[in-house]
């Protein structure tokens, strides 16, 4: 049976302003329960404050069971991990799609969780698990995860960009997560890259997400294949509606020139967005994750060149643009990083000096 250190958890029950994690590493270690709430999957893990993943569980999200049913499964996964662990667990961190009220842990109808209107996730989990719970936007959580556990280690100024079904992001400035006035900063997918562009689900036009997310790439690729029926992109799938970003990657790897032209156009939009990010935040590093990052060398070398051509040289010369490291585990590492940033007054990770340049 798991033994909890009540006094330790109670003293850190209030949020720490600024999410500052730049203090030196304390001598003590902690174990965290990390919960990731996604529209297609739930994940739970036990992670130490030094980044060791002790155990994890994953299962599909049953949206048809409603918020209560989904949270019930999340609680069951958390309890299973806690029951199998002999040591103390200090906090629970949760990453969930936004918008949300990060201070009160209330989920405010995110598009990937239909029916989740003002769901008091923090309260439900604290009542069920009897531990302090911290909730944050999953993109912020991923930024914190890559900063502390992944490709962002050693940075004080980092922008994380996830290219997945949509595009999200998180910004670390001066060693702190930048959240904005209401906690919703980092909506980088809605940077406008074409003032007369295609309509976006947000109500705007020409948003980066419309062109460079996995969904956006698939949508535009289907249109491209219709206009270029002789391209390999058009011939790889039996039905045009089956063309996805993965189809684009396969066609690129086969050397199809028409698909290469489509991809070059896509990278122009992405480079415009990244250049705007660099001009706005002056980061040391831009980290790109999500499914589109799996394009690997088809993505990163040409993107670096295109961003360099669009960015003021003094701002770009020392920026490192690189792929995220945490891959499929970014959700639970992100949730753990949320617990670290908001449950403790000092960092559990030291900041290491930055040595890399634009690799």
Image: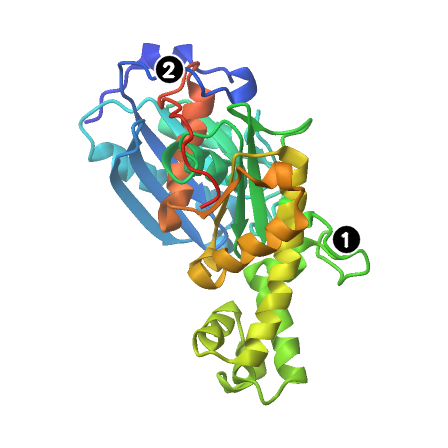
- Crowd class of label 1 (few under 14; some 14 to 19; many from 20; radius 10 Å): few
Q: Residue at x 48, y 74 (%)?
A: 252
* Residue lying furthest bottom: 230
Up-down: is 320 above or below 242? above
Towards the viewer: 63 or 159: 159
Q: Earlier in the sequence, mark 2 or mark 1?
A: 2
Residue tagged 2:
24
- Within the image, what quadrant is residue 60 found in? bottom left
Q: Residue at x 58, y 63 (%)?
A: 215
Residue drawn at x 55%, y 61% as measured from the top left: 214
Task: Indicate the secondary structure of the residue bearing disc 2.
Answer: loop
Asked if disc 2 and disc 1 are in contact, CB closer than 8 Å, the reply is no
Vertical side of 222 occupied by 206: above or below: above
Q: How many marks?
A: 2
- Looking at the image, the residue that sits furthest to the right is 196
SS class, disc 1: loop
Q: What residue is disc 1 on?
A: 203
Q: Is residue 56 or residue 254 the one in the foreground?
A: 254
């Amino acid at each position: 049976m798991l033994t909890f250190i009540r006094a330790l958890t109670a003293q850190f029950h209030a949020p720490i302003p600024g999410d500052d994690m730049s203090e030196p590493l304390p001598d003590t270690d902690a174990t965290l329960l990390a919960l990731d709430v996604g529209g297609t999957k739930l994940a739970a893990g036990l992670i130490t404050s030094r980044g060791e993943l002790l155990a994890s569980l994953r299962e599909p999200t049953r949206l048809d069971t409603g918020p209560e049913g989904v949270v019930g499964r999340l609680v069951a996964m958390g309890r299973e991990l806690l029951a199998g662990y002999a040591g103390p667990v200090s906090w629970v961190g949760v990453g969930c799609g936004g918008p949300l009220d990060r201070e009160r842990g209330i989920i405010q109808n995110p598009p990937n969780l239909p029916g989740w209107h003002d769901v008091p996730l923090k309260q439900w989990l604290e009542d069920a698990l009897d531990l302090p719970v911290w909730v944050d936007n999953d993109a912020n959580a991923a930024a914190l995860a890559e900063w502390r556990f992944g490709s962002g280690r050693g940075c004080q100024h980092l922008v994380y960009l996830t290219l997945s079904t949509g595009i999200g992001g998180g910004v670390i400035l001066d060693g702190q997560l930048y959240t904005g006035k209401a906690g919703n900063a980092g909506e980088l997918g809605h940077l406008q890259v074409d003032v007369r562009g295609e309509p976006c689900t947000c109500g705007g036009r020409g948003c980066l997400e419309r062109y460079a997310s996995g969904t956006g790439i698939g949508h535009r690729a289907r249109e491209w294949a219709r206009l270029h029926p002789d391209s390999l992109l058009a011939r790889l799938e039996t039905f045009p509606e089956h063309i996805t970003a993965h189809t684009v990657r396969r066609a690129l790897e086969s050397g199809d020139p028409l698909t290469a032209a489509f991809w070059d156009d896509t990278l122009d939009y992405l480079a415009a967005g990244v250049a705007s990010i660099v001009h706005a935040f002056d980061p040391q590093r831009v980290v790109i994750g999500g499914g589109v990052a799996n394009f690997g060398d088809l993505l990163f070398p040409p993107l670096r060149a295109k961003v360099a051509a669009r960015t003021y040289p003094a701002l770009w010369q020392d920026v490192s643009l690189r792929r995220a490291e945490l891959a499929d585990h970014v959700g639970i590492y992100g949730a753990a990083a949320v617990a670290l940033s908001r449950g403790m007054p000092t960092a559990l990770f030291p900041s290491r000096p930055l040595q890399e340049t634009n690799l």
